[in-house]
Image: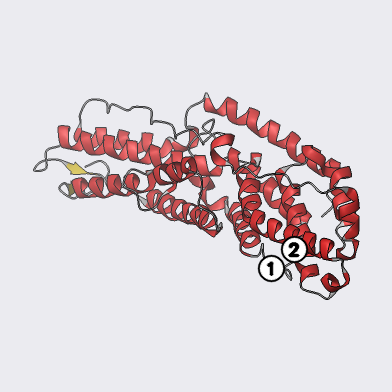
Amino acid sequence: MKTSALVLFRRYAAFGLVAIGMGLLAGCSESGAEVPWEAYHQQLVEDLQGPPLERHTPSNIGAFPSRKARLFSIAETRESLPNVYALRECRITSLVAARNNQLGRMAPPSQRWLYERELWQRLSGCWNTAIPDTLSEEDRSRLHRLTLHKTQQLPLVSWNTLFDSSEWEGSFSRASHAIDPEELGATSAHLEAVTYLHRMILHQFDRQWGQDSSTLEGHLQTLQQRPLSAEIMRALLLATQRLEEGTDYLEQHGDKHSTCLTSWDASGLDSLAEHSREWLKAVNTLFNAHPVTPPKALRDYRQRWLSLNSESAPWAAFQLARKQHQETRAHFSRCQSRNK
């Protein structure tokens, strides 16, 4: 579970650059994400020979809950060195010493997660051997208490690891923009990262499943490359806004008896629907994998922004806006050519 200081430095230095970049981008337009909508709205104006289509800036996503609101309070386990040494046959002495010397209080959440999981593995494995029979009654009782305590804490540690990480928090950054449609297909590495985190949570009580520090850090580096959750949610908000504006324009300025509409390639909406659903499903699956009841602030955020079922969430709002726009277009005939 050793991770060099250089690797961690590069990871967090990179995160700082990404954060600065996102902050600069937040002040710009939606860039690539707006291009197809500008073209489509202009097409509607030309088809209807109407006034300019009034466009508004979509609202931003909600703020991710504060650190205090999204984490569990976990009491620190304190054992004297003699007490830890008394359990040396369980191979926890060197582990605790390494943690105190190399990680300490400044260790990133991911390294604390690896430490806590390995500590549980050794304690639990030790308890299920003949070693407890060789211990004094006091030490055997201490081993049992520590094992039980760490077993109860591990799910909370797993949760805190994810939701205290800058990589996961950054994924929901409001200092972001809607993802460019052409980049939707380039998110497989992010899905792999979330899948690995999901696998770690599912196997947190599996003593046979080996954790790998470099693999975990690599996936976290991938997640910090861009605020993908925010970019996808904002793409859904943007699409919903532009679809509703298009629908309103057709209803206000179109004549269903004399107006025809140029054929519209809506494949970009299919791609957005497919990839956003895939990502939101993966994120919700990761939430559900934790065997704990999430803090209320996270439950509320998830319901409002990440849900695939809630009518108030971006996904459902996008689906409804798309359906209504398609139904409105269906009332108009199709132009025989672009030049009509």
Q: Nearer the viewer, residue 70 or 53?
A: 70
Please say if 91 is above or below 64: below
Dividing the image into 4 quarters, which one contains the C terminus?
top left
> Could you tell me which residue is drawn at 72 percent across and 44 percent down?
76
Q: Quadrant of residue 135?
A: bottom right
Q: Residues within 10 Å of mark 1 (few under 14, many from 20)?
A: few
Residue 88: image location, x then y, percent: 90, 61
Please say if 259 is above or below 333: above
Here the colouring is secondary structure
**Three-letter amino acid code of the residue under disc 1:** Asp
Dividing the image into 4 quarters, which one contains the N terminus?
bottom right
Q: Nearer the viewer, residue 111 or 80?
A: 80
**Three-letter amino acid code of the residue under disc 2:** His
User: Is 328 displayed left or right of 106 in the figure?
Assistant: left
- Say what secondary structure mark 2 lies in: helix
Please say if 19 is above or below 88: above
User: Is 314 displayed left or right of 66 in the figure?
Assistant: left
Residue 141: image location, x then y, percent: 77, 62
User: Is 29 displayed left or right of 250 in the figure?
Assistant: right
Q: Nearer the viewer, residue 78 or 328?
A: 78
Q: Is label 1 in contact with label 2 (beta carbons under 8 Å)?
A: no
User: Is 253 displayed left or right of 140 in the figure?
Assistant: left
Q: Quadrant of residue 204?
A: bottom right
Q: Earlier in the sequence, mark 1 or mark 2?
A: 2
Cα–Cα span, label 1 and label 2: 18 Å
User: Mark 2 highlights which residue?
Assistant: 144
> Could you tell me which residue is drawn at 72 percent across and 68 percent down?
209
Q: Would residue 322 be visible to someone looking at this image?
A: yes
Residue 261: image location, x then y, percent: 22, 44
User: Mark 1 highlights which residue?
Assistant: 206
Q: Residue furthest front?
A: 137
Residue 314: image location, x then y, percent: 38, 43
